[in-house]
Amino acid sequence: MTSEQALEALRAAGDPGKATEMAAYHKVDRPYLGIANPVLDEMARDWRRGMDLDARVALADALWQSNIHEARVAAAKLLTQARIRPDDTVWRLICSWVPTFDAWAIADHACLAGQRRVMADLTRLDEIEGWTISEHMWTRRAALVITLPLTKLNFPKPEEATARARVLDWAAGYVQDRDWFIQKAVAWWIRDLSKHDAEAAQTFLDAHGKEMKAFARKDAGKYLR
């Protein structure tokens, strides 16, 4: 599957009416084809079956560079897999995308691919920590979204517990950031954490909740009594 063939397949699956709706919804100036997410799932799965890792990375890179909404989502889906060994080329490509994030949907799909790579190698938090002080809001937000699996561990191993505490420190540093997307990301992290470690989530809110925007504080404590 070449990038030209993949883009041709995406365009053939598009719906102009839906594309117009998506452009209005996402509010970012880029081409939209109007393809539903389940269709992109199926297309990415089909492409992945017949490709080795190097070919997948090359296709994902080309699709991302097209700047088409659905192509960027498909690029992320091509790399969303728990077991990839070795995975450094995948991680490097995902990291190269982060500074170009400009919309939540594309960023979240890319971070979903990145989450697998973070959990496969927690030393990657050293690199992610640098994102927390970026001037680019979407990069700062990505530091929390890409580490969300750490919130979902009921019985974290020592290194996972250390990683979780580390990201909680990052979140604490974000609470004074007034950007809606940053506040939402902090709330998302704490809300998900509350389902698996209510005590840690409550401790965070007791310490930092007053500094959060009201909507974020409410969302973060949604599952806490």
Image (tube, rainbow, N blue to C red):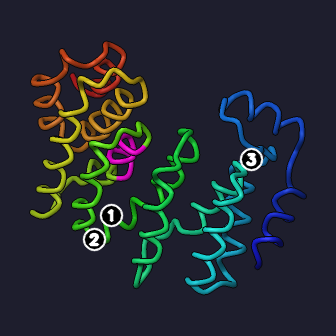
The location of residue 120, given as percent across then percent down, is 32, 71
In the image, 37: left or right of 203?
Answer: right
Question: Callout 1, which amino acid?
Answer: Val
The location of residue 1, given as percent across then percent down, is 76, 79
Question: Callout 2, which amino acid?
Answer: Asp
Depicted 113 relative to depicted 14: above or below = below
Q: CA distance from mark 3 to mark 2?
A: 32 Å
Q: Of marks 3 and 1, which one's residue comes earlier in the chain?
A: 3
Q: Residue at x 62, y 63 (%)?
A: 75
Q: Quadrant of the C terminus?
A: top left
Question: Callout 3, which amino acid?
Answer: Ala
Contact (Cβ within 8 Å) of mark 1 with mark 2: yes
Say if the magenta span includes residue 169: no
Crowd rating for badge 2 (residues with CA inside 10 Å; few <14, some 14–19, many 20+): few
Local SS, label 2: loop
The location of residue 56, given as percent across then percent down, is 61, 77
- Residue labelled with disc 1: 118
Disc ID at residue 36: 3
Local SS, label 3: loop
For the record, the magenta segment spans 139-146
Q: Of marks 3 and 2, which one's residue comes earlier in the chain?
A: 3
- Residue labelled with disc 2: 121
Locate residue 168: give its quadrant.
Answer: top left
Crowd rating for badge 3 (residues with CA inside 10 Å; few <14, some 14–19, many 20+): some
Magenta stretch secondary structure, dominant: helix
Q: CA distance from mark 1 to mark 2?
A: 5 Å
